[in-house]
Image (spheres, rainbow, N blue to C red):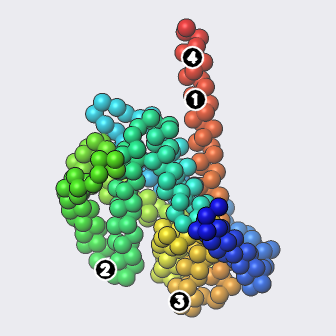
Amino acid sequence: MSLRVLLVAVISCGLVVGLVAIIDAQVGWVAMLQFWTQVDLPLALAAATLLLLSHCCRAERLFGLLQQPSWRPRRLDVYSISSWHTALNNLLPMRSGEASLPLLIRRRLHRSWSDGVGSLLLIRGLDLLALLWVWAATIVAPVFSPLLLLGWILTTYGAFSAFPWLAGMLPSRIRPPAGVNQLLTRPVRASVLTLAAWLLKFGALLILAQAAVPQSPGIWGSAVLAGELSSISPIHGPAGLGTYEAAFVAPAALGGVSLDAALTVGVNLHVFLLLSSVTLAGLLEIAVTVLSRGSHNAVTGRL
């Protein structure tokens, strides 16, 4: 084991142990889980539905990206790949889960490494632009929200226009796939799917936070945005434990929320995200397996 791997493992374990100890000392796990007794079932179902729709938007974006004139992946396979990519990103430290997308595209769809890596680069570029615009919206909304939406579309359109030139400068091994050219002709669709995915996710988390601990939506919006920014940064513990909560609590505490309340909301929202992503990935994996076996049996029967 290299020194770097050992150091990452030690830091990761330290974050987990530290977070568990802080939660137990500050709030207690029994009180922590009482969060869900304060959320009405209809609101919990609404939040789960919004989060599911967010995952669907992400999967549809990847599905559109991978399509090529002579080849079209099965939609369920792409949904499964997208869900595993999200789940592994949530669980693995230091953004190492990003490597799962090119690997899954390679193994399950039998596409080249450039397809997977190019798709990943474009997706993360869109996500970064979306988060920047959501951050801007939290500052000046709702007065300039229509202008911000127009600015988001124009920015992504400009980025798409410059993308072919930038992609041509990359080595052939990591050059984006030919399917990207199709997506470049539909920048509004890609922009809307990306922005919708993030807004649906934020909406789900805000519903839960506001239902459990009523506060100004701006306070919880800033906390959720900070938590999500921490989850896409390289400084990311295993399952985001510790790093997500620290980023979430800071703006909430600055907004006047007590430390105990902010920590309770942050931990429970984080658990909600982790469990939902793993559950969705598992269910889609079962669906893919069942359908694949059914197709194989049908072919065997005809033979």
Distance between the alpha carbons at the discs numbered 4 and 2: 58 Å
Q: Are marks 2 and 3 in contact (CB under 8 Å)?
A: no
The residue under the point 58% across, 73% down is: 244
Q: Are marks 4 and 2 in contact (CB under 8 Å)?
A: no
The image position of residue 93, as x and y in percent, is 58, 65
Q: In the rendered image, which residue does mark 4 sit on?
A: 298
Left/right of residue 27 with respect to residue 180 in the rendered view = right
The residue under the point 29% across, 77% down is: 144
Q: In the rendered image, which residue does mark 3 sit on?
A: 255
Secondary structure at badge 2 equals loop
In this view, which residue lies farthest toward the top? 303
Secondary structure at badge 1 equals helix
Does any portion of residue 11 appear in the rendered image? yes
Residue 43: name its quadrant.
Answer: bottom right
Q: Quadrant of the N terminus?
A: bottom right
Q: Amino acid at mark 3?
A: Gly
Q: Amino acid at mark 2?
A: Val
Q: Nearer the viewer, mark 1 or mark 3?
A: 1
Badge 2 or badge 3: first in the primary sequence? 2
Distance between the alpha carbons at the discs numbered 4 and 1: 10 Å
Does any portion of residue 55 appear in the rendered image? no
